[in-house]
Amino acid sequence: MNFEKLISQIEGNKIIKETGGLTAIPPPFPRLAEHYGGFTKGSITCLTAASGVGKSKFAKYMTILNIMKKTQNTNIVPKIFYFALEESATDFWLSFLSMYMYEKHRITISVSQLKSVGNYTLSSELLEKVKQGEKFINTLEKSVEVVDYIRNPTGMAKYVKAFFENPEIGEYTYKEIEEGKRIITGYTYKSDDLWVFFVLDHISLLSNELAPDTKMKLSSYQTFDFMIKDYVLDIFSKRFKMVNVIVHQQTPASEKQTYTYKGQLMEEKLEPSMEELHINKGVHQDYEVVIGLFSPARYNIATHNGYDVSLLGNHYRSLKFLKDRYFGLENSSIGLYFNGANGEFEELPRPQEMNSPTASHYENFLRKTRQ
C-alpha cells in the first residue's frame, strides 16, 4: 500500500465522522463507548466466559441487537453470518422474541416460557403480544443469517465465500506472480457501506477438521488453530475485511475456587483470563480484543469492584478487557446489569454512584428483575 492510499483512507474516515457517519460500531454502553471504539472492519474480537455465565446472550446482544440499533438511520448495511453451534436456529430466534417482549412491552419472558415448557403455559393475551413481534423478527432476518448445521471450519469458510463470489457484492483483486499465474491479494466491495460480520458461537464446539493433505482428523487445538489462522485471520479479516467475533469458553479449571493459605478466596483466579481460554495454545495471539464476562454471585462473592453483589445477585456481571491492541483498555472493567431470562444487558452507574446514600440505583435495578 502506498502513502497516497493511506492518506486517502485517513481522509475518507475523517469525512465519514464529520458528516455524522460511523467508522466503527460502538458498544451499547455509553460510558464504555467513550473509550472503546467498538467493532471495525477486519477486526477479530473474542468474547469469553465460563460456562453458564451468559456469553452467548452477550454475543447476541453485542453483535445483533446493538449492531442493528447503531446502524439504523445510517448508510451502513449490515450482513451478519451467525454460526450457532450451541443452539438451534429456532431457539436463536425465540431468544430475540424474548428480547422484543421486554423492549416493547417490558415483559420478561424466557425462551422456555415462550415454548410453554414445564408447568408454565403461555396465556392467550401474551401470545397476542408475541405475535406483534413479527415485524421485528422479519427486519432482523433481512440482515442476520443463522447457520446451525455447519460445525467444521472448512464448511463455514465455503459458506461465507459463496456470499462474496456474487459479483453484485464485489470482486477479487489479483497480483500476477509470473506469466499466466496470479494470486488473490484482496477483495473490493461494490459498496463500502456493506459491513459483513462473522460470529462463531462458540469455537469450543467446532467439529474436528480433516487435514487438507493427509485427511487425518486434527486435534481440537489444531482445529482451533486452523479456524482462526487459515480462515478468520487470512481470509475473513485480511481478504474480505469482515468483522469477526469469536465466542471462546474458559476452561473448566477456571471455575475451581482457589484459596490462600489463610483460607481467603482468590477472586482473580476465578475471573476470565487469557490463560484459561479453552484449549487455547496459541490462537489467542490472533485475537485483537479479548473481553471477559464474570459472575461473582455463583461463588458467593458479596462485593466486586465496589458493587454490592449480595443485592444484585446473579444479575451482576463484570465486563473486563483481557487484551486490547488498540484502545489501551487492558485490565479495565465495567459493571453490568444482566437479566438472563430475556438476554438484556445494561451498564451500571459507577460504584460510588450506586452506593450513594441518596441514590436508589439498586432498588431500580432490582425492580427491573420483577417486571
Image: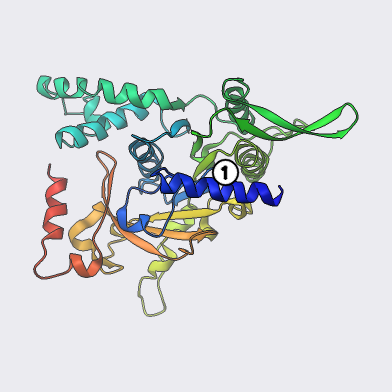
Which of the 4 image quarters holds residue 87? top left
Q: Residue furthest bottom?
A: 262
Q: Is residue 260 left or right of residue 43?
A: left
Residue 302 at least partly seen: no
- Compared with 326, 89 (above or below) is above
Q: Residue at x 12, y 54 (%)?
A: 364
- Compared with 174, 271 (above or below) is below
Q: Position of residue 176 (x, y in %)?
A: 83, 33
| Badge 1 amino acid | Gly
Count of numbered circles in the view = 1
The residue that mark 1 highlights is 42
Coloring scheme used: rainbow
Label 1 residue SS: loop
The residue nearer to you, when weighing 363 against 193, is 193
- Compared with 291, 124 (above or below) is above
Q: Position of residue 263 (x, y in %)?
A: 36, 76
Q: Residue furthest right?
A: 179
Q: Residue at x 64, y 54 (%)?
A: 282
Q: Residue at x 91, y 29 (%)?
A: 179
Q: Is residue 116 left or right of residue 72?
A: left
The residue nearer to you, when weighing 147 against 198, is 198
Residue 65 at least partly seen: yes
Q: Position of residue 319 (x, y in %)?
A: 37, 57
